[in-house]
Image (cartoon, helix red, strand yellow):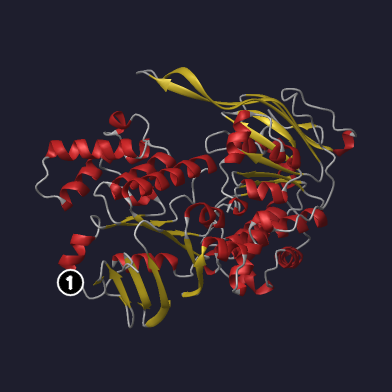
Amino acid sequence: MSQPLLAVNNLRTYLNSSGRVVKAVEDVSFSIAKGETFCLVGESGSGKSITGLSVMQLLPQDIASHPAGEILFNGQNMLTLPEAALRGIRGSQIAMIFQEPMTSLNPVFSIGEQITEALQLHNPTMSDAEAVERAMLALEQVQMPNARARFSDFPHQLSGGQRQRVMIAMALACEPELLIADEPTTALDVTVQAEILRLLRQLQDATGMSTLFITHDFGVVAQMAQHVGVMQQGRLVEVGSTAQVLRAPRHAYTQQLLAAVPENLARHRTGRSDFSPTISSINHVEDVGLKSDLLLSIRHLNVWFPIKKGLFRQTVDHVRAVDDVSLDIPKGQIVALVGESGCGKTTLGRAVLQLEKPTSGSIQLHGQELTGLSARALRPLRPKMQIAFQDPQSSLNPRLLIETTLTEPLKAHGIGANDEERLERAANILADMQLPREALWRYPHEFSGGQRQRIGLARALVLNPDFIVCDEITSALDVSVQAEILQLLLKIRAEHDLTLLFITHNIGVVEYLSDQTVVMYKGKIVERGATSDVCGHPQDAYTQKLLSAVPRLLKI
């Protein structure tokens, strides 16, 4: 049997923080053959990224140590090599793609300069002209649109998918033997994710490169890996072939993770699904039956943003973020709004809540027109329509106790006879979110991501609204935490008779959670109907493309 390219044997990685030792990686062993993809999968904090950084020896030496184990790359122990030897391996023989390209790319240098710098660093004799040509070829290799024209662009001028392609081009420019990809598709739209995964497979087939792919998405695992390792609390609890681990997992933790994947969750349906407009008549708003069941009515809504140019900043055109959208949402429904980044989903949600002023059109809540109302006239209606944001870390005030975060809206709207009554209401809402009463006296940073998302939902629910816009609230969560939030949403929908507009690009979540699905593309609605119809029998070409790009466990 040939020697593996990478062999990690009994690795331990300890982090020393303020005198406290964190056992981030404990007795981990796995190997990667030449040309193979090995996936490390697990939840946040399981030690996946620390393992990848340990292989590259990128952890700060003043806080990281390896009390035991070895990392053999081409027979050399990375833990004992001097720094000069490590510098010769990093980038040229082992390269890494990081999760967030915007924080990894230097904002003050063009993408061409950053790729040529990497090339010349590992090839000191390479001329500037040769480095430029190699960098352009690398951009073309990752199928960057208009690669040569993009060479002088800065990171902020590129989309998320294009920035990720630049990171891949930079990593592959020196033709490494091993690529470590740390969650490279987590924040990408499903179609862009499919393109990046297909690109990585093509490059791997062409070069014979090995890949250590770090992810928490089992759909990606099914699509990319030959072998899988499942990590929990720093330990590798299960290792095996992709088919074996996904079809017949042995460890209880692996079984728990797979059970939490949306396509594996039990399809508990609560509430009614009586809103089933026909797909063929997209531009016609169908009758939903009893008008008393109609909560929200949107007619010919436009939200346009002016494009100004010239010395006098004259308007020369408009960005049509929402373009002639009409939609009815009945009471008690969960309606999923699906589409890629930039399609207008969030703008539509914000316009419904009058957080973004529409250019034209009509929005009615319980038959009352919202567009054109002054801030003062809108104030009595605000408690009835709320929003839960994508990132609770940035939407919760870090200086306020959770008690203040929840009672301040009640006080502002004159709800509750006194502070004690408002406090009791806040505690009851936290209990609904499965959080203890003592959470009232803590700050946002003292909670995990999933707990902060529950607090964000509690803040939206505390005013007893009729309608909530949920804007990508599960996009950054681990699969098990995501499952908890989804089940919680179904529970509170049933208990509070809530209506939800659920904005997302995760089709698995849509299939599990929503009664109805609305698909947006370039500011317009291209398809809508019962979720089972839209996801099971899509009619529009864009919807078909969106659904075909979803990585699924069933494909193994």
Residue 470, placed above or below residue 8: above
In the image: residue 506, left or right of residue 518: left
At horizontal 14% and vertical 50% (from top left) the residue drawn is 123
Provide the residue designation for mark 1: 82
Q: Residue furthest front?
A: 1
Give percent across and percent down for residue 479. Answer: 59, 60
> Residue 87 location in percent, x, y?
19, 62
Crowd class of label 1 (few under 14; some 14 to 19; many from 20; radius 10 Å): few
| Quarter of the N terminus within the rendering | bottom left
Location of the C terminus (image quadrant): bottom right
Image location of residue 175, percent across then percent down = 26, 50
Residue at the image position 79 percent from the left and 29 percent from the top: 278
For this orientation, the residue located farthest to the left is: 125
The quarter of the picture where residue 360 lies is: top right
Which residue is nearer to you in this view: 194 or 270? 194
Residue at image coords 53%, 38%? 341
In the image, residue 91 above or below residue 12: above
Q: Secondary structure at mark 1?
A: loop
Q: Is residue 347 visible?
A: no
Q: Nearer the viewer, residue 152 or 202?
A: 202
Q: Reply above or below: 291 against 554.
A: above
What residue appears at the point 73 percent right and 68 percent down from the top-left corner? Answer: 431
Residue 328 in which image quadrant: top right
Q: Nearer the viewer, residue 552 or 410?
A: 552
Q: Is residue 45 visible?
A: yes
Residue 512, percent from left and from top: 71, 51
Q: Amino acid at mark 1?
A: Pro
Residue nearer the viewer, 158 or 8: 8
209 left or right of 421 in image: left
